Image (cartoon, rainbow, N blue to C red):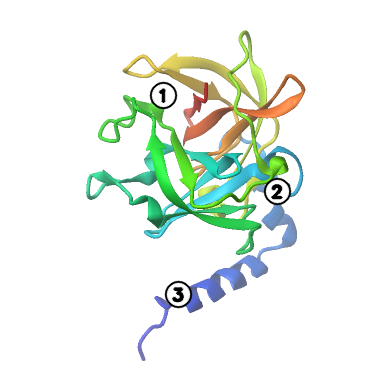
């Protein structure tokens, strides 16, 4: 008898059954890279109302966030098709605001995106300090409470931040790490600034905002572009 494991509907059902088979406590608490514990993010209140799942019609999934009613940001490398050596067509990129387990507050398609001029996808590590993309959406989906303003990194010392992302091990659920910090900065091969941070994220968090309180309000001061046990990197947004 033939196997039906490749049927999309069956895959979704199996995934749901596996999720239900996991004890509730295990569903809600997951380890991160630096020993911290990640828990489901609150997408209905505060800074993470701006959080997006960014996904392409080719199956790539990243995190992003709204910076204006019809403008979002994510990591540039999420939009690059390495096998064919070009960026994906904008219309093949979708954003889902407040996504959780198949439900979301709003959806839009990208009509155009702008890659930071210094980013070279053929040399992603050498130009990692410019790994940013601005997504222009086909219609507005964010109200004032779902927009995260962008701010420069405050000068001097460590900066307390918060982060939530659609990590690869739970792409259906945004997870937030414990409070963490920007720990310093380095330079990529072109001289662009790259932020170091100690947040408990894991693979798949690219495009997630690093949120700090600036002048009394939550603002994105950086964006995750790499997560690994040895090196968590982010890019400044100003």
Specify few, some or many for label 3: CA neighbours under 10 Å numbering under 14, 14-19, or 20 or more.
few
Specify few, some or many for label 1: CA neighbours under 10 Å numbering under 14, 14-19, or 20 or more.
many
Of the numbered discs 2 and 3, the one sitting upstream in the chain is 3
Q: Give the number of the mark in front: 2 or 3.
A: 2
User: In the image, residue 97 lies at what x, y percent?
Assistant: 61, 52
Residue 38 visible, this angle? no
Q: Which mark is drawn over residue 129?
A: 1
User: In the image, residue 108 lies at what x, y percent?
Assistant: 53, 55
Q: Residue at x 56, y 57 (%)?
A: 107
Number of numbered callouts drawn: 3
The residue pinned by badge 2 equals 43
Residue 161 visible, this angle? yes
The Cα–Cα distance between marks 1 and 2, rounded to whole angstroms, is: 28 Å
User: In the image, residue 123 lies at what x, y percent?
Assistant: 27, 30
Residue in the foreground of this view, choosing between 46 and 8: 46
Q: Residue at x 52, y 25 (%)?
A: 237
The residue pinned by badge 3 equals 8
Q: What SS does tag 1 mark? A: helix
The Cα–Cα distance between marks 2 and 3, rounded to whole angstroms, is: 28 Å
The Cα–Cα distance between marks 1 and 3, rounded to whole angstroms, is: 38 Å
Of the numbered discs 1 and 3, the one sitting upstream in the chain is 3
Q: Residue at x 64, y 47 (%)?
A: 142
User: In the image, residue 198 lies at what x, y percent?
Assistant: 59, 27
Q: Is residue 117 left or right of residue 199?
A: left
Q: Is residue 3 left or right of residue 177?
A: left
Q: Residue at x 49, y 73 (%)?
A: 11
């Amino acid at each position: 008898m033939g196997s039906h494991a490749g049927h999309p509907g069956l895959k979704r059902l199996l995934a749901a059954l596996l999720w239900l088979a996991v004890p509730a406590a295990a569903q809600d608490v997951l380890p991160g890279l630096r020993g911290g514990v990640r828990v489901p993010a609150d997408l209905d209140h505060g800074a993470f109302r701006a959080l997006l799942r960014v996904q392409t019609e080719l199956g790539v999934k990243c995190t992003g966030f709204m910076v204006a009613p019809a403008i979002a940001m994510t990591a540039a490398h999420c939009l690059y098709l390495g096998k064919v050596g070009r960026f994906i067509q904008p219309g093949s990129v979708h954003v889902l605001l407040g996504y959780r387990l198949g439900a979301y507050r709003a959806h839009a398609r990208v009509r155009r995106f702008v890659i930071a001029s210094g980013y070279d996808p053929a040399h992603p590590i050498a130009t990692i300090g410019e790994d940013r993309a601005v997504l222009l959406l086909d219609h507005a989906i964010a109200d004032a409470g779902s927009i995260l303003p962008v701010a420069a990194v405050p000068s001097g010392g460590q900066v307390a931040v918060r982060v939530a992302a659609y990590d690869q091990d739970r792409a259906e659920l945004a997870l937030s790490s414990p409070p963490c910090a920007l720990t310093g900065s380095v330079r990529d091969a072109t001289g662009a600034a790259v932020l170091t941070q100690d947040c408990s994220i894991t693979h798949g968090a690219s495009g997630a905002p690093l949120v700090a309180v600036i002048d009394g309000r939550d603002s994105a001061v950086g964006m995750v572009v790499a997560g690994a046990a040895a090196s968590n990197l982010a890019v400044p947004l100003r």
